[in-house]
């Protein structure tokens, strides 16, 4: 059973599917999570604190997923391909994570910033960590690479950056792929990474070099 904090974060993510953050009300989130408003404010302090916690939660869940995939019993190069595919698919379905990875925060999303200097520390330890502010895209990429073994760190960074390029600059859908309502079909980046890019990652990462660390030339 999720904790009150987890339930509130889930409610906030669900609210963002249909509404902009600016119109999301704390009272509505408390009702959706089946907790009191006082519990909500005890956990996050304010709506800004909730935004920071939401960003931190998404970053943490993302890194946990990367670690799980890299630990799978498979050849390391295959695991890196799976990670790249997963990043593209997850970024497509989770706009806060997509903003964390790319730095592209639009008006529908919260714009979390660190708590102002001199502010009273939050009573909840998890919130004190969140109040430090969300990681920058470069920091999140570095944390992703750190999840891989040292011998595959370069390959992991390559896989991550290829995945992010697919998220940031999707292919333009062809005219014949327009929907019946004449709206453009979803770009490729909203679906798992293309087989061609998967083959490219596998080919590059399978190259054996003379370096004992398998540094990609």
Image (cartoon, rainbow, N blue to C red):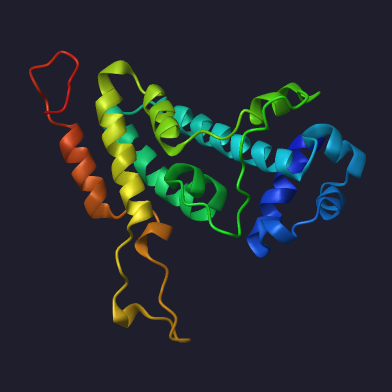
Seen as rendered, the residue at the extreme bottom is 181
- Who is closer to the viewer here, 213 or 53? 53
Q: Position of residue 118 (x, y in %)?
A: 72, 24
- Who is closer to the viewer here, 63 or 119? 119
Which of the 4 quarters of the picture holds residue 131? top right
The quadrant of the rendering that contains the N terminus is top right
Q: Please give the name of the residue rendered at 29% of the width and 55% of the height, measured from the top-left corner.
A: 194
Q: Is residue 176 left or right of residue 105?
A: left
Residue 10 visible in rendering: yes
- Residue 203, relative to residue 186: is it above or below? above
Q: Position of residue 90 (x, y in %)?
A: 48, 48
Q: Is residue 172 left or right of residue 217?
A: right
Q: Position of residue 95 (x, y in %)?
A: 54, 53
The quadrant of the rendering that contains the C terminus is top left
Q: Please give the name of the residue rendered at 29% of the width and 24% of the height, measured from the top-left corner.
A: 153
Q: Is residue 143 left or right of residue 36?
A: left
Seen as rendered, the residue at the extreme left is 210
Residue 75 visible in rendering: no
- Who is closer to the viewer here, 147 or 196? 147
Q: Position of residue 196 (x, y in %)?
A: 22, 53
Seen as rendered, the residue at the extreme top is 212
- Residue 189, relative to residue 135: is it above or below? below
Q: Is residue 193 left or right of residue 32?
A: left
């Amino acid at each position: 059973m999720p904790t009150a904090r987890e339930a509130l974060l889930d409610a906030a993510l669900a609210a963002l599917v249909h509404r902009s953050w600016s119109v999301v009300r704390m009272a509505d989130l408390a009702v959706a999570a089946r907790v009191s408003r006082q519990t909500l404010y005890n956990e996050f302090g304010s709506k800004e604190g909730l935004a920071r916690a939401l960003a931190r939660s998404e970053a943490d869940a993302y890194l946990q997923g990367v670690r799980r995939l890299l630990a799978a019993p498979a050849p390391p190069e295959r695991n890196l391909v799976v990670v790249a595919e997963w990043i593209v698919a997850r970024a497509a379905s989770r706009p806060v994570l997509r903003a964390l990875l790319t730095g592209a925060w639009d008006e529908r999303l919260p714009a979390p910033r660190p708590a102002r200097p001199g502010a009273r520390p939050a009573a909840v330890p998890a919130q004190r960590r969140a109040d430090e502010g969300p990681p920058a895209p470069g920091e999140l990429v570095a944390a992703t690479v750190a999840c891989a073994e040292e011998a595959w760190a370069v390959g992991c960074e390559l896989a991550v950056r290829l995945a992010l390029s697919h998220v940031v600059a999707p292919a333009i859908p062809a005219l014949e792929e327009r929907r019946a309502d004449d709206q453009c079909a979803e770009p490729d980046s909203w679906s798992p990474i293309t087989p061609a890019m998967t083959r490219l990652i596998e080919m590059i990462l399978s190259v054996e070099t003379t370096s004992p660390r398998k540094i990609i030339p």
